[in-house]
Image: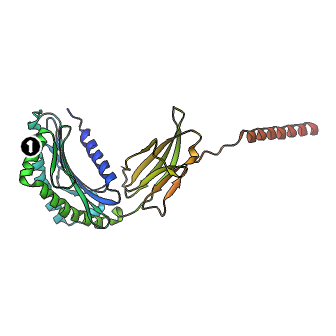
Amino acid sequence: MRNPGCCTLLLFLVVMNLTEYCAGSHWLQIFNIVILEPGIINSRFIHIGYVDSIQYQGFDSKDPMAILKPRTAWMEQELPEYWNVETASILKLSQVDRRLLHFMVTKHEHRMDDYHTLQEVYGCNVANDGRFLGGHFRLTYYGYDYLYLNEDLSAWTADGKAAEHVKSTWDNGGDAERWKTYLQGVCTKRLLRYLVLGKEMLLRSDAPQTYVTHRVTPEGNVTLRCWALGFYPAGITMTWKRDGINHTQDMELSDTRPAGDGTFQKLAAVVVTSGEELRYTCHVHHEGLPEPLTLKWEPPHTIPIIAILISLVLGILVVGTVIIFLMWKK
């Protein structure tokens, strides 16, 4: 039996990859997930819509109302007609995807009373000036089959026997061309509209909070970590330099990750020889900064041993002088 958390994990990983790709532009992404659970006759259908890292609408067939709802304040500007039409469209799509999941399970001769998921992810990418930059579509029968639209949006690539069968059907039906038209047309227009509705949130620029940390490794080397937190949008560049020259050896650059509050975070780490930390600088570029930042590790301020000894001697002398004076006076 599959762990129900795997569906959420897969969705999270896809978001991460696209977040990294969409730096300097904007994405509209749709996640449709069908979940077949043991003992449940009707599979669950979940629809989630994102603009960049912001969830703007959602639908869950498990909800008592089972209607499409806004997930952010700026989407409440849409008229009731929008929600009625979109709910009807999603209900129709849920039946199509449920049949597709049933086909995948049957094709693989899997048990219907086991846990199965089907995930459909698609979206479009536009530049800041509104130009269409690209689109994507991916269908996943988790752990077994993958079907995705090639980068030029003209043909399908399939992995798995059931996916190959679906590909053949979709090739004959001209589905690749229909998806290309949708991604370049309807999807792009909707994304541009959402950017207008949510401009105060989606078109803002929050500068990163930055600092450098220092950690000694078990081998005796030092790991310097350059942190960038709380920034928006996701596009950011972080590099390390040694004596002013780009340094990529022993450097680790993490993915740009959502922080959970609508902002992002990123980490650039480098392993250096102990004693050479001050030769390294971290450079951060982000549109929220008035100019690029240059950071370095600052060693903690320590009092020299000689100064400590002098202070102790002076303290002893003062105390001794006071004692002698009191004894003489007595």
Q: Where does residue 193 sit, x and y in percent of width and height?
A: 25, 66
Residue at the limit of the structure toward the front, as seen here = 245
Inspect this view and state whether residue 67 appears. Answer: yes
Which image quadrant: the N terminus? top left
Nearer to us in this view, 323 or 5: 5
Q: Quadrant of residue 112?
A: top left
Q: Is residue 271 above or below residue 172?
A: above
Which image quadrant: the C terminus? top right
Q: Where does residue 17 sit, x and y in percent of width and height?
A: 30, 49
Q: Residue at x 24, y 42 (%)?
A: 7
Q: Where does residue 166 sit, x and y in percent of width and height?
A: 10, 45
Specify how the rendered protein is coloured.
Answer: rainbow
Pointer 1: what residue?
Answer: 165
Secondary structure beneath dot 1 equals: helix
Q: Is residue 287 left or right of residue 152?
A: right
Q: Is residue 280 left or right of residue 15?
A: right
Given the image, on which type of amino acid does mark 1 rest? His
Q: Quadrant of residue 30?
A: bottom left
